[in-house]
Image: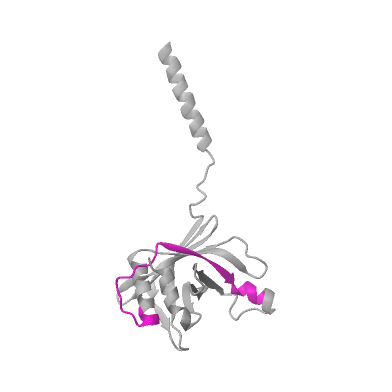
Amino acid sequence: MKGHIALFVICFIWSCKNHDNVGRTNHNAPAMIEKYSILPLEIDSSEGWFDVSLSVVEISEIKNGTLMNAISLQGGQEIGLEVFIPNTPTDEKGFGNGIMLKSTGDQSDRLLQLLSKLYLNNSENKIQFRDSIVVPYVDLNKFSEKVAGGSLQDSSTVKKYKLFFEGQKEDEYSEIYLNFNVADKRIELNEKDEEYRPILIKFLSK
């Protein structure tokens, strides 16, 4: 008799736990994943800046934003990073917080080493991309519309952001443009000003 009671209790507990899990979903799991081909890295220095363009090979729509894996080929090696753009509302002028640049390992180390070479003429190949960094930003498409009173050129196909890197000291400050070309599936890291180069490398390094 005791054996039957014990068996009943075990079955009841298992049933309750199983019932509790019904209908539960992992909200951090991607709701949709799109994959694309890896393409060569593009560097544009025609205007005196070094603008780097990476192909987006994967886009994951998750609960709180969009995660993009931007990887390209450079000299026969993969180079790139992950970019997370939150879907939380910005203020009325387009300012927000939470864009994240995340390392993918050796690919991101090579990207940082390339930027260091382009920006600082530094061939140091031991610097490493930090695990991740979350920064404030301004949505330039929204800023242009709400503040400047007009739309940016190609605003329907390119999402444009300016990222702000701020440290504890007054001189620890840098900016860079981050564009997502929706049509071409590319992430563009475009320079804001030459004076920001060394500080930007510092912020992105471990």
Q: Quick one: which residue is furthest to the front in this view?
A: 169
Tell me if residue 126 is in the magenta stretch.
yes
Left or right relative to 123: residue 201: right
Residue occupying image coordinates x 67% and y 79%: 148
Note whether residue 65 is visible. Answer: yes
Note whether residue 69 is visible. Answer: no
Expressed as whole percent of the image width and height from the top left, the position of residue 110 reads 34, 72
Give whichever of 46, 57 is nearer the camera: 46
Q: Bounds of the magenta span?
A: 117-145
Residue occupying image coordinates x 45% and y 15%: 5
Expressed as whole percent of the image width and height from the top left, the position of residue 116 reads 37, 77
Screen quadrant of the C terminus: bottom left
Give whichever of 28, 123 is nearer the camera: 123
Left or right relative to 91: residue 34: left
Q: With respect to residue 140, does 134 lie above or below?
A: above
Residue occupying image coordinates x 49% and y 32%: 17
Tell me if residue 187 is in the magenta stretch.
no
Residue occupying image coordinates x 31% and y 72%: 77
Expressed as whole percent of the image width and height from the top left, the position of residue 62 reads 52, 56
